[in-house]
């Protein structure tokens, strides 16, 4: 049985075209929460640095909010950025302004709740994510210097609260497949989740910050995050040996990890031109050097005063 991944073409972030396409693709993909459902939108609010390109574009988040509000859902937007808080990064990247006239709260993920891992140990996942009625995960399509590509699966790692993400890099990085397995297990422990990918202007060359813009014109939606990422990797011409999360999904035989199992009810990968899209040819270590970890914690603390 094939797994549907819905692709749509959007030339830019200007409404009303974007609002219409987001509503159409979410509806076509079967995402229509009943009235009164509590929906948590999880964008990628990674860091203030070059936040306009590093974060999910505010216009995509707004379009999703408008669609959900039309469904009479109760909507909030939340994340746990690498540096600072969700409210700070949202203000810097323009998301706060984009949502100003909508009845939508922006929340910072706190109150970590321990989630046990299959290989031992545990990780603190934000209660706001674990207690959500439904999560709409909205990553931005970017290359990643450590993970090859960050898409639907990787963006769920942002549900881990605060500095526990950096600590996870240190504890589980360079220990076989444990870091990749951790991210997949966090994804699997979340409540009912749907996925909407912002690939209108992607980031390539380097990432998840400090990369270059690449106009792809893609918006994608799917219930299955592994299938969505597999479809995008195929569109870009990437192989599993350069995308550790895809490699781990294949090893675990997760549904959606094999391209032959994916169906495209709307547009397909050949409808998009990824010529010139560049990704890291050699991945950086997952574990941070101690000095980088310390600098990251200081930067996170300083960001809170912005």
Image: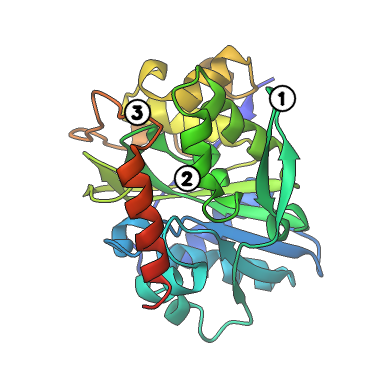
Instruction: Locate residue 192, reporting x and y percent.
Output: 74, 47
> Which numbered circle lies on residue 166?
2
Q: Residue at x 31, y 64 (%)?
A: 52
Disc 1, SS:
loop
Between circles 2 and 1, the one closer to the viewer is 2
Instruction: Locate residue 165, reporting x and y percent.
Output: 52, 46
Instruction: Locate residue 219, reporting x and y percent.
Output: 44, 49
Q: Foreground: 8 or 75?
A: 75
User: With respect to residue 10, does 249 lie above or below?
Assistant: above
- The residues bearing labels 3 and 1 have C-alpha atoms spaced at a distance of 23 Å
> Which numbered circle lies on residue 149?
none
Q: How would you rate the neighbour count of disc 1 (Cα within 10 Å): few for under 14, some for 14-19, many for 20 or more?
A: few
| Horizontal arrangement in the rendering, residue 143 relative to residue 262 (left or right) | left
Q: Residue at x 70, y 26 (%)?
A: 120
Q: Are marks 3 and 1 in contact (CB under 8 Å)?
A: no
Residue at the bottom extreme, as displayed = 101
Of label 3 and label 1, which has the lower sequence position? 1
- The residues bearing labels 2 and 1 have C-alpha atoms spaced at a distance of 20 Å
> Which numbered circle lies on residue 285?
3
Of label 3 and label 2, which has the lower sequence position? 2
Image quadrant where one finds the C terminus: bottom left
Q: Foreground: 231 or 77?
A: 77
Disc 3, SS:
loop
Disc 2, SS:
helix
Instruction: Locate residue 66, reporting x and y percent.
Output: 58, 72
- The residues bearing labels 3 and 2 have C-alpha atoms spaced at a distance of 13 Å
Instruction: Give the image quarter of residue 275.
Output: top left
The residue beneath circle 1 is 118
Q: Residue at x 30, y 26 (%)?
A: 283
Of label 2 and label 1, which has the lower sequence position? 1
Instruction: Give the image quarter of residue 3.
Output: top right
């Amino acid at each position: 049985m094939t797994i549907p991944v819905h692709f749509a073409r959007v030339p830019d972030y200007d409404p009303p075209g974007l609002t219409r396409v987001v509503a159409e693709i979410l509806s076509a993909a079967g995402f229509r929460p009943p009235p009164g459902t509590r929906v948590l939108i999880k964008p990628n609010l990674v860091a203030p640095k070059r936040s306009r390109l590093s974060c999910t574009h505010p216009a995509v988040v707004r379009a999703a909010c408008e669609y959900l509000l039309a469904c009479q859902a109760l909507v909030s937007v939340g994340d746990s950025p690498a540096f600072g808080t969700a409210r700070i990064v949202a203000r810097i990247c323009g998301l706060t302004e984009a949502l100003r006239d909508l009845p939508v709260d922006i929340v910072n993920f706190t109150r970590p709740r321990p989630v046990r891992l299959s290989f031992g140990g545990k990780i603190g996942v934000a209660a706001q994510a674990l207690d959500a009625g439904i999560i709409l995960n909205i990553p931005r399509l970017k290359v990643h210097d450590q993970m090859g590509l960050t898409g639907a699966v990787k963006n769920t790692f942002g549900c881990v609260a605060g500095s526990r993400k950096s600590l996870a890099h240190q504890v589980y990085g360079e220990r076989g497949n444990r870091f990749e397995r951790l991210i997949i297990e966090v994804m699997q422990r979340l409540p009912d989740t749907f996925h909407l990918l912002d690939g209108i202007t992607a980031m390539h060359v380097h990432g998840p910050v400090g990369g270059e813009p690449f106009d792809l014109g893609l918006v994608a939606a799917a219930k299955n995050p592994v299938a969505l990422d597999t479809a995008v990797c195929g569109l870009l011409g990437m192989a599993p040996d350069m995308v550790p999360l895809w490699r781990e999904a294949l090893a675990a035989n997760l549904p959606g990890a094999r391209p032959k199992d994916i169906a495209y009810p709307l547009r397909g990968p050949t409808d998009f031109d990824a010529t010139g899209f560049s990704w890291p040819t050699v991945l950086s270590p997952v574990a941070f050097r101690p000095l980088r970890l310390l600098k990251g914690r200081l930067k996170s603390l300083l960001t809170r005063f912005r």
